[in-house]
Structures are given as structure tokens and as C-alpha cells.
Image (spheres, rainbow, N blue to C red):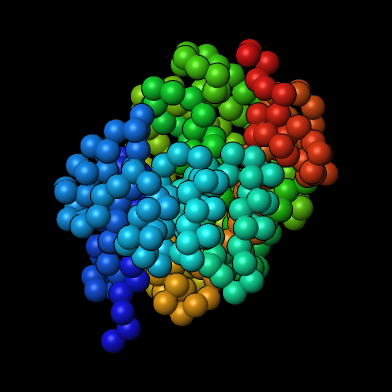
Amino acid sequence: MPAPVRIAIVGAGTTARHHVEALRALDDRVEIVAGVDSVDGDAGHAAAFCAGHGIPYAGTDLKKALADAAPDLVHVCAGDPLEPVSAALAGGAHVLVEPPPALSLRGLDDLDAAQAPGGPYVAMVFPHRFGPGPRRLRDLVATGALGRPLLALCHTTWWRERGGLLTGPGTYHLDLLVSVLGGWTEIQAAAHRLARPGRAEDVSLAHVTFANGAVASIVTSVLSPREESHVRFDLERASVELTRVRGHGDHWRVTPAPGHEKAVLAAWNAHTDGGRRGLPAQVADVVSSVRAGTPPPVSPAAARDTVRLVAGIYAAAFTGHLVAPAGLEPGSAFYERMEGFGPPWA
């Protein structure tokens, strides 16, 4: 039997806990060997997290943990990813990075360039690409079984104390949108700071046109007491929807267009519902790739359309102009920094 993949976790919050749970489900395929976290130089966070999860090594210095515990794979679950990713790659470990995968398009390209040919590699956490529902939808769109995509809705309406959801977990749903519809061609957007303190927006709205002709409405909010994430695709022959309440569940619903009931339901039901979903599914695929010595999903290059969509929403919202991908090339303000010149209320 192959040796287990040795894992280190960076971070000691809720996101890190979710990663530990996903890894534990893989049983003897993995071994969590280290936990690293430092808030204001306090070693207590890592110590408490590791004690609570049975992780043998706790520390505040990733470079030291790399030398002492020799992980094969580092999960970066907190903070600016560039420094821990660079340290892990230099230490010979693969990396799985939570959103924001980079704080700008430049940062994403820097992560991509930091990978050496043949590895170690960097992968981005975009869990809504994984599991039977997203695979089934992408397959049916690719084969034309549901007709052309026409309209999509992507609404992430949550309740949080701080803004900036668009660059955090809200990115998950945007990534599902991009993974199904492909590249975009133009964006109109608005962002507001209506009720939350700080610099980040608490509401954003965008109208996006995709290269295949489909259009999408995107709403992201941290002001919504009834929390829900809703992604809907209207195609020529069906509507397909995913609804998640408070970040949980994987509730897919398909509604055939009149006259297409039999063909659509037969195509949808021909795919299996079994297997892992979301983060556990992606973590399992990443671990399998590490064991096989192949690039794990999702690479920085594969995530670029999604990160560029986020940058495009900020650019359109903060400038008040229609934005195309060409406006986000190296040298532009919104390539260098996700918020470009800064929000209009700053």
C-alpha cells in the first residue's frame, strides 16, 4: 500500500476545520502531520487547534514546520496566500489554497509562475466544480443536450459582520458559473457600502456577458438575514438550479421546457448522483493527484477566468465603465490590485 500523503494545515479557524474533516474522510490515504498558525505571534491558536484535532505538530513558522514535519501537501486556509505558498513550494510541498487564491491577477500569475516544471504544484479551492451535480451539468451543456445557455443567476446573499464576500467564499459560486459558461466578454457592475464598517463593499451587483452569448446577473451581499446561495442556468430546453442554505446542501433541480420533458429528464437522470461533493470531493481529487505525481485541480491557470471575473466586477463597479478582459491586462490598476484605485467611498 502506498504511504499516506503527509498534510500540513495553515490556519486554525473554521475553514481549517472543514479541511481537517474532509481529510479525515480519506482515512489512511492521508496523515495530518502539522498545524501552523500565528495571530499576533500567539502560538496558542495552533496549539489549541492541533490538540483538538489530534495533530502531532503545532507551530507558528511554516518554514520550520516544513523542515520538521516534511509534509507532501500544505493546505493554506488563512491569510495572504503568497508567502505560505512560496515557502511551501520552496520546501518541496504541493499547495492547496483557499479563496482568495490571490489578492490580484498579478498575485495569481505570480503563483502560477512560482511552480516549477514537474512540480510541486499549486491548486485553488473551488469546491463547487466538484461532485456529481456540477459534472452532470457541464457534460450536458458541453454535449448540447439542454440546448444553448441563455441566462444565468448567481446570488450569494449572506449575513456577515464584514464586507468583501466577493473575494472570499462568494467566489465559489462565481467559479461554478464560469466553469459552466466559460469566458466572459464584458461586465457592467455597481458596488455599495450600505451598512458594514470598513473599506470593503457589502453589496455588489453585476451584469455579465459571456463569449457564448449567455448573460448573467450576479448579486453578492453580506446584509441578508435569510442566508441563501442560488445559482440558476436557463438553457433552451431546461432550467437547472442549485440552492444552498447557509453554505450547506447540494440541492439541484431541473425543470424541462415544454415539449422537452422526456429527453431532458432522461439525460439528467442518466448521470449518477453518487460520490463525494464539494470540498471533500476536491480534497480527494487533490490527494489522488499528489499520490500520482500529476498536477492537482484547480491550477492557477484554470482559475484565471474566475479571478479575472472578480477583478472585472470591481473594475466596472469602481470606475462606472463597461469592462472587457483587455482592460485587465498587466499594467492596469485592476490587474495590480483587486480594488484598483480603490472604492469610491474610500
* 191 is higher (above) or lower (below) than 212: above
Q: Quadrant of the N terminus?
A: bottom left
Count the numbered circles shown. Answer: 0
Is 102 positioned to the left or the right of 161 in the image? right
Is 51 positioned to the left or the right of 94 in the image? left
In this view, the residue in front, 20 or 89, is 89
Picture residue at 42% right of the left edge, 77% below the top: 291
Task: Measuring from the top left, give residue 185's x and y in whole percent.
Answer: 78, 46
Residue 282: in sight, yes or no? Answer: yes
Picture residue at 76% right of the left edge, 32% below the top: 333
Q: Quadrant of the C terminus?
A: top right
The residue furthest bottom is 1
Picture residue at 76% right of the left edge, 53% below the top: 211
In this view, the residue in front, 234 or 123, is 123
Q: Which corner quadrant of the image does residue 201 belong to?
A: top right
* 52 is higher (above) or lower (below) than 158: below
Q: Which corner quadrant of the image does residue 208 belong to?
A: top right
Task: Measuring from the top left, give residue 122's x and y in whole percent.
Answer: 54, 60
In this view, the residue in front, 262 or 178, is 178
Task: Measuring from the top left, give residue 300's x and y in whole percent.
Answer: 61, 57
Picture residue at 48% right of the left edge, 49% below the top: 84
Task: Measuring from the top left, give residue 141's x and y in whole percent.
Answer: 61, 64
